[in-house]
Image (tube, grey):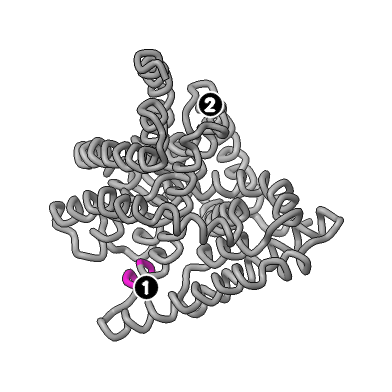
Amino acid sequence: MILAATGDVPVTLVELGVVLLVLAVAGRLARRAGVSTIPLYLLAGLTLGEGGVLELVTARDFIETGAEIGVILLLLMLGLEYSGEELVGSLRTSRRAGVLDIVLNATPGVAAGFLLGWDATAALFLGGITYVSSSGVVAKVLEELGRIGNRETPSVLSLLIFEDLVMAVFLPVAASLAVASGAGETVIDVAIALAAVAVAFAIALRFGDQVSRVVSSPSNELLLLTVLGAAFLVAGGAEQVGAPGAVVALLVGIALSGRAAERTRVVLTPLRDLFAAVFFVFFGLEVDPASVPSVLPEAAALAVVTAATKVLIGMWAARQAGIGLPGRLRAGTVLVARGEFSIILAGIALAEGLEPELGAVAAAYVLIMASAGPVLTRFADPVAQRLQARSGS
């Protein structure tokens, strides 16, 4: 009855079916090639948007809503990986490496933005895009290569946590800068956004156990409904006061701990994977594929510079922890990949119409870095083994 009454629904279902099958093929290709799925999902979006091989007609609105859900789920699940104590501990142990990481990896992006003739806000966004590693890609590579128990891994994870915390502060500031029309409005919007994040962070740290008890349920269905309902509610409320809802969803994840967090990860993982894929496709849809080739030289140059700076900071952090040269090389190369946060930042910039070229530069940059990162760290392992043999350690 619904299909008969609404003529667009069958077309939408067909288009969604095509999108999901294209993603399935892309994911299988990525798995066989041993690379992240993110660049192939971006390419899928580029081919399905305006100017692509097949342009979507009716499914675009659904995919846009799904992309918003995908961002929330990505950061919610990221928050579930950390406890409040781990966050505070990482701030203490990795603050020097974390500050150096900001300087080495955000500065090239900001400088490139100015060299391209962009304004300060667009340049700041590009600095954020080049700064932050992909926690999802790095965690997946560490697991696939069996490095979770390696001595250098705590240094890597501490840097990732530090970066995620920086982004929890940077995202509301960047979003406020993108929409504000004057200095006074900018200050007010930034203050409101930071206050909302600070309140959510305080609740996550101080009342995490109580939140976990309220949310917990022996039923997976009820647990799923409760966590998603809470995440969407606080994300929507945060958006109403000018704070990025996805960042507050990250703090909801941090507030959950123990058994509740473990079971939530299990029940939410399939949904996260689905809507995260939709998010990357939607970003690709927003970028004109004809604009990407023209910015490839700039994106490639930026990729070379920031791959080197990320390797340097990873090696330095591992050295501070007393790790030998092979472990330092593994730590540096595994951090090269950029992904979800970079695309989230670029998506905000695109939505606000900051700089026409920013979306294309970000897409090309992430395509390069998300592909090259896992490859570099796989090549680094044999090199590290040879270094280990030569050093006799």
Q: Is residue 175 magenta?
A: yes
Relative to 131, is 18 above or below? Answer: above
Three-letter amino acid code at the position of disc 2: Leu
Relative to 75, is 270 above or below? Answer: above
Q: Which of 58 and 31 is in front in this view?
A: 31
Relative to 99, is 312 above or below? Answer: above
Q: Which of 339 and 357 is in front in this view?
A: 339
Image point (40%, 37%), residue name: 322
Whether residue 58 appears in this view of the structure is no
Q: What numbered label is drawn on residue 145?
A: 2
Which region shows up in magenta?
Answer: 174-178
Three-letter amino acid code at the position of disc 1: Ser
Q: Main secondary structure of the magenta part?
A: helix
Q: What numbered label is drawn on residue 336?
A: none
Q: Specify the quadrant that holds the C terminus.
A: top left
Q: Specify the quadrant that holds the N terminus.
A: bottom right
Q: What element carries label 2?
A: loop
